[in-house]
Image (cartoon, rainbow, N blue to C red):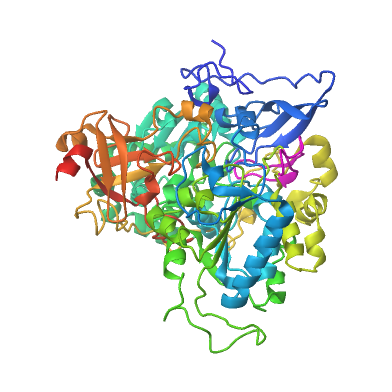
Amino acid sequence: MECRYLPGSENPDPGHPNSLCCREGMQTPTILDMPEVKPNTKVVHAVCTHDCPDSCGVLVTVDTLTGRATKVQGDPSHPVTRGFLCGKVARYLDRVYSPERLLYPMRRKAGVPKGPLPQGQEAAAFERISWDEALEFVAAKLKAVGAEFGPESVLPYSYAGTIGQLGYGSMDRRFFHRLGASQLDRTICASAGGEALLRVYGVKLGTVPQDFAHAGLIVAWGANIHGNNIHLWPFIEEARRKGAKLVVIDPYRTRTAALADEHLAIRPGTDVLLALAMMHVIFRGGLEDRAYLAECAHGGDELRKHALKTEHSPERAAEITGIDAETIERLARAYAMAGRDGRAPAAIRLNYGIQRGENGGTAARAVAMLPLVTGSWKQLGGGMLLSTSGSFPFNSKKLQMPELMRVSPLRRDARVVNMNELGMALTEWGVPDESCKPRSENPDPGHPVSWEQPPVKALFVYNCNAAAVAPDSTRVLEGLRREDLFTVVHEQFFTDTTDYADVVLPATTFLEHKDVMGAYGHLEAQMSVQAIEPLGEARSNVWMFAALGRRMGFEEAAFRDGEEELIAQALESEHPWFAGVTKERLEREGHVPLALPLNEHGEALPFSSAEWFRTPSGRGELLPVPEFVAPQESRSGAEGKGKYPLEFLPRKADNYMNTTFANLPGHQQMERKTAGVLEMHPVDAKARRIVSGDAVSVWNGRGKIALTARVGESVGQGVVAARLDWQKLSQDGANVNALTSERLTDIGGGATFYSTLVEVAKAMQLAAD
């Protein structure tokens, strides 16, 4: 049976994941040919700039008579994404040409309060204005806020709605730096794991997808490859056809877990202990690579002594992780023995789920140490992949120009606000009080006031649906309702966040602007060429922030740069890995591989020798040794014996990109089986007299949400799961983030979505009580 990935919007089974014709066997997809260029058409090379490790090359067929895109498909010449698209982006024209697209600037009508608006009726709360009016109005408001409360009272809020170099961080950063606005610590997704990689290896680099085909054991640790890294899957299947085994470690039975040779349903937040128990078995049996550790790692003796402590034995680990001791022993031995005696090596696909708990940074550090212990980096197909984003030496400083803060009214670097603490920033800093008072010394004597903790009086949201994705959303929404908060949202659709906006500005999709980008799941630099003209009056981030900067009176030449100048600046790098990566070549070829060092066999093997490391010690850093500290909000932690006994997994939907695509009917159809569902283990459901189909309430001290129970084996006992959606599309107008907290990870200041405790009851029973 041929298993073909279908490009375009057509899908033989809209409810089937990722437009796949079959699950069984999961053969390598048919690689599609280059599209035929018919009369009155052209084919443009673009790149999917959504927040995904795959960063697919996309070929867009455009009708030159109408200017309309008629087809999107994968670029068959791309060495990783190889001509097919995921189910999300295969239907991308549904998004571009949706009748619900925001196409014109809009301002909230006088007297219309901020708050949830029915989907499809949001426009009634706004009046259309011109771009000229919008820029003038926003500029005047930002000037007034800065004059009264200081420029740091303006807070930008963005993340990875686009990960293109220009769209993610270029003219926007210039604008807010020159304004003197607060800086945003963009930590909601990957900061703990990213910081872990930097601490262990000194650079974000790893095993490339193509090399997974040479592995003999693949461990997907907190990685739903089939849901959000689908282009790695064919390489894994290639390895499996040669005899490799796939083991998935995940508290949830994901698509990937269902297709694996073995699924280990670890309890949330206990990954550190499992990694240490594996090291315990490896060191106890003398299975470590002592020569490699001596040459390429710092702290090997200390780690060995630490891992061999009794509390890290498989027996002790089994009590907390929920994985039995025999299985831990078997996994550790299989991992250590892979690559020996002619065997193919072991590779770990670590993903960011592991680092979204209170001890998430340490968890990522501990797992990242395993390839150092066994020396699996030395062989093709061995090692680990979390992120390759640090491998692309784009000139971010040139793009973002942080030095502009020195010519802002502050004359210094602005304060930094962690984006996971948006609720606190909007509710605790909203009104001047004892914690928000004028400084005794003012760095700019000509400025009327400078605050020790400036209140947030203006919020500018772009590349992000803040009202839906930020933790502790009850608190976030309370802050967004403030009448004294001036909020601007740059968006493609009316979202949860635009419901609270004073001004809404229309944004382009990746088909409607030009950008350059790397990836965090492979090593191809790419150029995304504009395929079509912007619909309506949609404008890119670059255009909008440059125009707004000029309207603010910023006279620097930096605000006259366009896409072409910014792309050239992004590529200004002397780094040897960027050799051959030029603007001209990218425009001609679409994608260009990084020039990593090669060994005598022509292979790039990261961390196979000491010169790859970028740590202060110049070697893989195993110190400080990772310690298991149970998250406070977990069954093993300080709050685990309280009134909220269930560990809650607020998962991402397989067919959305965070909350992107959640409003589109075709994508909703693909997610219909999980929409509004709480997944429960039979033991937990029976104890609460709950059966599948029951309306249930899920709550803790932060909030409450309404869902429909589904009882089964997708989660282990003591764990419940639901997926992220828009607030306004949820049963009672509250999504999973009503339950999550603003606690930060142990390192990196990341979000702790997966350290959440809740209780569940039948909705009728709770009402009766």
- The magenta stretch is 512-537
Q: Residue furthest top?
A: 1
Residue 744 can be seen, yes or no: yes
Q: Residue furthest bottom?
A: 440
Q: Residue at x 53, y 48 (%)?
A: 125
Is 453 placed above or below 480 here?
below
Q: Nearer the viewer, residue 437 or 393?
A: 437
Instruction: Give percent across and percent down for residue 462.
Output: 60, 52
Asked if residue 29 is among those painted magenta in the image, a careful observer would answer no
Q: Nearer the viewer, residue 536 or 382?
A: 536
Residue 595 can be seen, yes or no: no
Instruction: Give percent across and percent down for residue 307.
Output: 35, 55
Instruction: Give percent across and percent down for residue 471.
Output: 42, 54
Is 119 situated left or right of 601 in this image?
A: left
Q: Nearer the viewer, residue 524 or 749?
A: 749
Is 633 placed above or below 91 here?
below
Is 315 placed above or below 407 here?
above
Quadrant where the N terminus sits is top right
Q: Residue at x 56, y 56 (%)?
A: 502
Dividing the picture into quarters, in which one does residue 80 lie?
Answer: top right
Dividing the picture into quarters, in which one does residue 252 lie?
Answer: top left
